[in-house]
Image: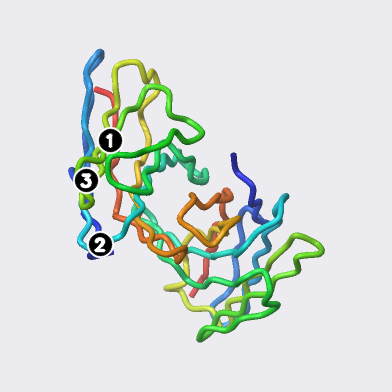
Amino acid sequence: SQQGEEDPQALSIQEGENATMNCSYKTSINNLQWYRQNSGRGLVHLILIRSNEREKHSGRLRVTLDTSKKSSSLLITASRAADTASYFCATGWNSGNTPLVFGKGTRLSVIA
Amino acid sequence: DGGITQSPKYLFRKEGQNVTLSCEQNLNHDAMYWYRQDPGQGLRLIYYSQIVNDFQKGDIAEGYSVSREKKESFPLTVTSAQKNPTAFYLCATRQGGGPQHFGDGTRLSIL
């Protein structure tokens, strides 16, 4: 069952602009993760935020988590053409190895 | 991800044929997963294994089978019972509740 739902489904911006993607989920979680997928490739892990965290940064990435609203956002600052990819959120409901549940993704196009 | 090897990269299946997709990992991760991705869609879980000699069905297990005889290997067989097998198949691993690591996928098509 797909729990995460990303919004928007597709986003097109100019190079240098910021890109914001949102993820909503339905049940309680232990952590939320964001992944990136280039066309025809596997997913690459970007960042993990735990349920007791509100914000996390990694380079040009900023992730927020609001457990009361069951939502998260991924901000990519100063976007580059190389950021063009699909971005997925995934939720984990415990600290073990039970499968993550992925959303349908946001397709980001960064135009040079 | 260099630690997970999926083969072949492209695979063609004839009507009524079973095909097996390979997934090998050298990350020493306990858990392994198979996902199916259709164009423009998210990932749907087929099967997963948290330990050798044990595996569980995911959301769309019908028409698929797996085995986990070795920690490093988790092959997926797409049987003739799977009537719509055309998709991109992704294998992943995980350890200690951390992030999932993915292979580069196998694209399966019907001849």
Side of B54 where B16 appears, left or right: left
Q: Are discs 3 and 2 located on one and the same chain?
A: yes
Q: Are marks 3 and 2 in contact (CB under 8 Å)?
A: no
Nearer to me, B7 or B58:
B58
Q: Which mark sits nearer the N-terminus, 2 or 1?
A: 2
Q: Amino acid at mark 2?
A: Asn
Q: What is the quadrant of the N terminus of chain B in the image?
A: bottom left
Q: Which residue is mark 3?
A: B9
Nearer to me, A104 or A77:
A104
Q: Amino acid at mark 1?
A: Leu
Nearer to me, A18 or A97:
A97
Q: Picture quarter containing residue A94?
A: bottom right
Mark 2 element type: loop
Which residue lies at the image location 60% right of the left edge and 55% below the top edge? A93
Horizontal and vertical percent position of residue A24 = 71, 56
User: Distance from label 2 to label 1 (Cα)?
Assistant: 19 Å
Check the residue under mark 2 and report the chain it is in: B
Chosen colour scheme:
rainbow
Q: Judge the density around disc 1: few (<14), some (14-19), many (≥20) Cα neighbours within 10 Å.
A: many
Side of B29 where A3 appears, left or right: right
Q: Which residue is mark 1?
A: B76
Mark 1 element type: strand
Q: Are marks 2 and 1 in contact (CB under 8 Å)?
A: no
Mark 3 element type: loop
The image's mark for residue B28 is: 2
